[in-house]
Image (cartoon, grey):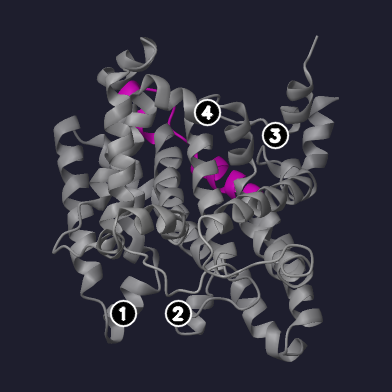
Amino acid sequence: MTSWTDRLLAPFQRETSSGRYLPEIDGLRCLAVVMVVLFHLHGFFATYEEPSTVPDLIATGTGQALEYLPHAFIGRGWFGVQIFFVISGLVLSLPYVAHYSQGEPRPLARNYFRRRLIRIEVPYFIALTFSLGVALLYGSGGLLDQLPHYAAGLIYAHAFFFNGEMNPILHVAWTLELEVQFYLMVPLLCRVFALGRAARRTLLVVAIVAVDLLAKDSEQGISRIIWQFTVLGQLEWFLCGLLLADLYLSPVLSGIREGGGCSKLDLLGLVAWMAVFVLIDFTFTMTPRPFVMLLAFWCVLAGRHLGALFRNRWLTSIGVMCYTIYLFHNFFIHVIIGPHVLNQLIPVEKGNWPLNAFILLFLAGVVIVLCGFVYLVVEKPFARGRMPWRAYRQGQ
């Protein structure tokens, strides 16, 4: 007999074409998308005069530091995007690692691009077109003003045509432009796995360091266009995903996972995740954050209790629909919750922490539930990388 939890979460289970499923990754997708949702709600609750960085928190004393800690963490929610980039690098490169290191069939480029075209492009087209309608209803410009942004968004090139500006129709589309550029590069980048284990890992580490250093010197002219308007400026995070994929299929991690995980790595993982967010406030000639993030991911995959946490079915179900949440959450936040809920139904005192954190979490939950209904209509029919009518015919 199935429980109410099974029935409720059944529509939000991952359907994979490869059969290789890592529930912890969906748990990490949940972390990333919740961070982004909280970050975009954050502006309704913060005065931006609160202490936000680690040095500022330390300077305020223990009591105030604890009071403003939720504000500081939620204000770092933009970093959920980099978590998504690492996940993309990991998931997309795993079949190539399996091919080169374990002799599995080589992924066919035709199938690779077709699945991504359907799974990514169809929901994106629906979201962008819907957002165009919202912009025409609630925005200040008319159709002729919005059409250039819509057209540039359709070909994932808004940053090129509008000097790096976010698309006013769908602000979050800037990350999808980078993701699509990375998708096109994956078959070529994954040739690195044809090298020996030591050689490919050394090359990936050197590439991560080089990208980090080169991206910092990108303020002017053609250098700015290359490093800030394209995936190259964020490539270090995707490359971390490639390196993580190689480590995931290594005998060491496979042995740890087969043994149920290592509890000693749970504490190390917690420290690594905290360090990732602390390091945001510090400037280095070469930032260690990509490698600390790599360690944090590795501990989730290898840790006994940390892995169990991210395999929680509620978290993985949210992770499954993270793409829909990412595409539509700003609509619910800025068109519905902002003007019709905050101060109308829920009084808000900006800067009142940590009370505002509880309101934020509640509203984030509401946004996720609403996006869940959208997911069932907009994304789930295309989740297998096939048009739903073709999947229906094959199922008959």
Q: Are marks 1 and 4 in contact (CB under 8 Å)?
A: no
Task: Look at mark 1 in the image and give the residue it sits on.
Answer: 224
- In the rendered view, does 154 fall on the left or right side of 28? right
Residue closer to the observer: 102 or 345: 345
- Three-letter code for the amino acid on which mark 1 is drawn: Arg
- Label 2 environment density (alpha carbons within 10 Å; few <14, some 14–19, many ≥20): some
Q: Are marks 1 and 2 in contact (CB under 8 Å)?
A: yes
- Our reading of the magenta stretch's main secondary structure is helix
- Label 3 environment density (alpha carbons within 10 Å; few <14, some 14–19, many ≥20): many
Task: Look at mark 3 in the image and give the residue it sits on.
Answer: 12
Q: Nearer the viewer, mark 1 or mark 3?
A: 3
Magenta span: 96-119
Task: Look at mark 2 in the image and give the residue it sits on.
Answer: 164
Q: Which of the marked residues, 1 or 2, is nearer the chain's N terminus?
A: 2
C-alpha gap between disc 2 and disc 4: 35 Å
- Three-letter code for the amino acid on which mark 2 is drawn: Gly
Task: Look at mark 4 in the image and give the residue it sits on.
Answer: 23
Is 283 above or below relative to 95?
below
Estimate the x, y position of residue 379 in percent, counting from the top left.
71, 47
Is 159 above or below relative to 250?
below
SS label for mark 2: loop
C-alpha gap between disc 1 and disc 4: 38 Å
C-alpha gap between disc 1 and disc 2: 10 Å
Residue located 31% across and 53% down the image: 62
- Label 1 environment density (alpha carbons within 10 Å; few <14, some 14–19, many ≥20): some
- In the rendered view, does 356 fall on the left or right side of 124? left
Quarter of the figure with residue 233: bottom left
- In the rendered view, does 96 fall on the left or right side of 203? right
Q: Are marks 4 and 3 in contact (CB under 8 Å)?
A: no
C-alpha gap between disc 4 and disc 3: 12 Å
